[in-house]
């Protein structure tokens, strides 16, 4: 799974394996091993790869189809969502790419509040 995702991301960006290997500070042979599913990177290397491609480690490992994300926790959660009792929120680039505006998000929050109130 990891190798397939790495190849896909590399080709989407138009990079050579050698270039990526240099950027994440491994040999070309080591990086090729990752792409060919012959070896797994150490945690710190995996995070370097995720940072390089600007994707989540969960995406690289096949745990999600969501490539881009930011996890908000605790006091980083908008007050409206804290009031709903949501512990965390994954905000993805796909939402932005699909044209979600701040107003769209606010409308979504109102819809969730209405659903919550109807269920109480």
Image (spheres, grey):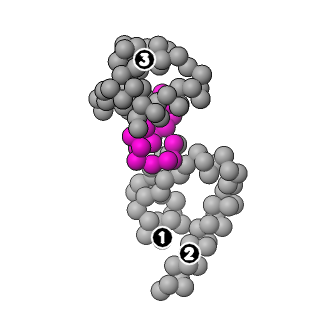
- Mark 1 residue crowding within 10 angstroms, few (<14) / some (14–19) / many (20+): few
At numbered mark 3, what does the secondary structure look like: helix, strand or loop? helix
Tag of residue 83 = 1
Which label was assigned to residue 103? none
Q: Which mark is residue 21?
A: 3
As rendered, which of 60 and 102 lies closer to the eye?
60
Residue toward you, 51 or 86 = 51
Sort mark 2 into few (<14), some (14-19) or many (20+) by Cα contacts within 10 Å. Answer: some
Q: Which residues are magenta?
A: 52-67
Mark with earlier residue (3, 1): 3
**Alpha-carbon span between mark 2 and mark 3:** 47 Å
For this view, does 1 lie left or right of residue 104?
left
Name the quarter where the N terminus is drawn: top left
Instruction: Work out whether residue 36 or residue 55 is closer to the camera in this orientation and state it.
Output: 36
Q: Nearer the viewer, mark 2 or mark 1?
A: 2
Q: Secondary structure at mark 1?
A: loop
Q: Position of residue 61 (x, y in %)?
A: 39, 40
């Amino acid at each position: 799974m990891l190798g397939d995702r790495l190849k896909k991301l590399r080709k989407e960006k138009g990079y050579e394996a050698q270039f990526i290997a240099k950027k994440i500070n491994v040999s070309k042979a080591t990086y090729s091993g990752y792409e060919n599913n012959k070896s797994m990177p150490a945690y710190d290397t995996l995070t370097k790869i995720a940072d390089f491609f600007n994707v989540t480690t969960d995406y690289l490992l096949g745990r999600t189809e969501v490539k881009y994300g930011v996890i908000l926790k605790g006091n980083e959660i908008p007050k409206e969502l804290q009031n709903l009792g949501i512990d965390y929120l994954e905000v993805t680039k796909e939402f932005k790419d699909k044209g979600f505006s701040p107003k769209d998000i606010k409308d979504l929050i109102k819809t969730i509040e209405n659903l919550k109130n109807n269920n109480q």
